[in-house]
Each structure stands twice: as structure tokens, then as C-alpha cells.
Amino acid sequence: MKNFALIGVGGYIAPRHLKAIKETGNELISAYDKSDSVGIIDSYFPRASFFTEQELFDRHNNHVKAKGINIDYLTVCSPNYLHDAHTRYGLRLGCDVICEKPVALSPWNIEALEQVEQETGRKAYTIFQLRLHPSVMALKKKIEEGPKDKVYDVDLTYITPRGYWYYASWKGNVQKSGGVATNIGVHFYDMLQWVFGPVQKSVVHVASHDRVAGYLELRQARVRYFLSINGEHLPQGVTGSYRSITVDGEEFEFSNGFTDLHTRSYEEILAGRGFRIAEAKGCIQTVYDIRHAEPIGLTGDYHPMAKYPLTKHPFGW
């Protein structure tokens, strides 16, 4: 059994990590979040110590270690802009670290974390759960076994509606979340590069507070993408989130099989086969480039979902 500490236990993604820690037979001994709305802990680790100040969390963790109780892993579920700082904290505390994506907002921050890995002798992992999805693994195998010079045409559409609360939170702040491409798209950009190879060209057509659309050339794919948090973009009759990926005009079905992917990720990490933070450089560079690109506008019949007129920011920002 391994002992875990967790930063960001009040966040949206934290329950998946709590579940994964529990289902892999491990123990959460301490947790930290600025918010105290963390009753979810009772469903998994009611005896875990909880703190709303990182200084007290740090003091407790050091007291625990002084008693000879090891903290094997620190899980990071904090806001995106704090991921690299909290990963650095975990490494220097003497833990291996499991960090939610994105592990950093800028590619050079990953290089800085790699240096801390070397200094401390600890390892930092990130969560790329789509790489463990059976359908994605099958697609990667198909591409690897196919013609090496074939270039596929891929269309990605992902619409996951968010309410006005989104814009009042850190997620609506580009400096803290990285914007729509990072916040909801980083795992798709990683998956596409994992399957089709690295990005060779990136063009952004539309970018705003609620959507991003563009074009990527990968080693073996031409990708048109549209990502949105605006519920008005959902196809007629669709409620909730909408995911669609087509490869050469054929729908790639991967809507099922998401339930246990965080637990699978933990199983791989605990077995020494997890995805190290160095593997995140490609997708972090991609979202960084998208975030800093100058949109060139749409040309022709670019993408059916991108035809919606740009909407005013709900808070007028």
C-alpha cells in the first residue's frame, strides 16, 4: 500500500483521483484546497487530514515524514497555472508526483521540472487517459501497421457546455487556464499526436472566450478541429457533451470506456509504466502555439460547427 497526499481536493477532477487511489488499494493521508467544500473526501478517505492553507499542509506532511511515515505520491489537481509549482513542491518533498493535465502552461516549464526530477531523484507523471482507451489504442495500432506514407484526414469536434460560472472562475481566465484549447482540448491534442505523429504546422482560424477552431498538420494526419464550451453549438437533439472524431470520413467511435481510465492510469503508474511529464511536451507546445497565434479567420466551408457567429463575453470582458 502506498501513501498519497493530494493538492486540489475540492476541484472538479479530484473525485476521479480519489476513486483511483481507493481502487488501487492505497491510502490518502493528507489533502489541501483553498476551498473547504470537500465533503467528497468522506466517500473515500474520511480519516485523511485536510488543510485550507498550503503552509499548514506542508508542515503536516513534514511531521508525518519525521515520524517515519513515507508519503509516496503527491497528486496534483489544482488550477492549471499552479500545476508545475505544485509538482515541484511534491518532488522536493520527496514524493513521486501524479499531475493532472496540463502539467504546465508553457513548454519550458516542463524542462524546469525535469531538472528538479534530476535533482531530487523523484519522478513526475501526468494523466493521459485517452492513450489507455481501448479504441484509441486500436487506432494507434492500425496506423502503425498501415502505410507509413499515408496521410489521414481527421475532423475533431468537441463541445462541452459550461455555464456563466466558468467565466467567474480561474477557468475563464486565459492566464490561469490557458484558454479553451488547453482547458478542454489538451488531452485530444496529445491523443492525436500519439496516434498520428508530431505537429508540423498549426493554423488557428477562430479563437475566442468560448471556442477555438483551426488546422493541424501532423506527420500522418491533416486535422481540422473545433472545440467549444458554448451549448448553442451542440447539434440539434444533443444534450450534454458532444464528441466526434472522423478519420477519412469514417466516425471513430470512442464514446464509451471513459469511466475507469483514471484508475487505469494509476495502475500503470504504480506498475512503473506511467506517462512521464517529458511526454507532455508535444501537446503543451501545441496549445501554447494555439494560444499565442493570430487567428486568420475562416476560408470557404471550413467546418460546419465554426459558422456560429462570435458571441459577446457574458461578463463583457
Image (spheres, rainbow, N blue to C red):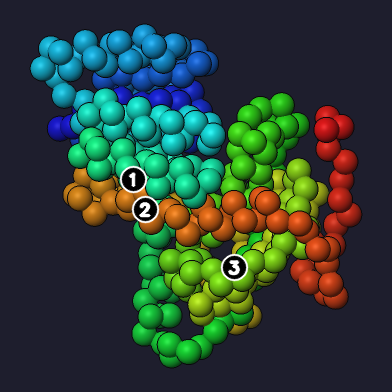
Seen from the viewer's position, the closer of residues 107 and 8 is 107
Relative to residue 120, is residue 301 depicted above or below?
A: below
Q: Position of residue 219 (x, y in %)?
A: 51, 77
Q: Which residue is mark 1?
A: 114
Seen from the viewer's position, the closer of residues 97 and 201 is 201
Q: Which residue is mark 2?
A: 278
Tell me if residue 122 can be seen.
no
- Numbered disc in front, either 1 or 3: 1
Q: Residues within 10 Å of mark 2 (few under 14, many from 20)?
A: some
In the shown orientation, is residue 103 left or right of residue 316?
left
Residues at marks 2 and 1, CA–CA distance in whole angstroms: 7 Å
Relative to residue 294, is residue 250 depicted above or below?
A: below
What element does badge 3 sit on?
strand
Say which label, 2 or 1, has the lower sequence index.
1
Instruction: Look at label 3 and name its amino acid.
Output: Ile
Tag shown at residue 245: 3
What element does badge 1 sit on?
helix
Q: Position of residue 63 (x, y in %)?
A: 21, 10
In the shown orientation, is residue 220 left or right of residue 164?
left
* Rendering quarter of residue 299: bottom right
What element does badge 2 sit on?
helix
Q: Residue at x 49, y 50 (%)?
A: 107
Q: Residue at x 33, y 53 (%)?
A: 275
In the shown orientation, is residue 69 left or right of residue 166?
left
Q: Residue at x 72, y 62 (%)?
A: 204
Cβ–Cβ under 8 Å for marks 3 and 2: no
Instruction: Look at label 2 and name its amino acid.
Output: Ala
Cβ–Cβ under 8 Å for marks 2 and 1: yes
Say which label, 1 or 3, has the lower sequence index.
1
Q: Position of residue 199 (x, y in %)?
A: 54, 68
Seen from the viewer's position, the closer of residues 208 and 47 is 208
- Numbered disc in front, either 2 or 1: 1
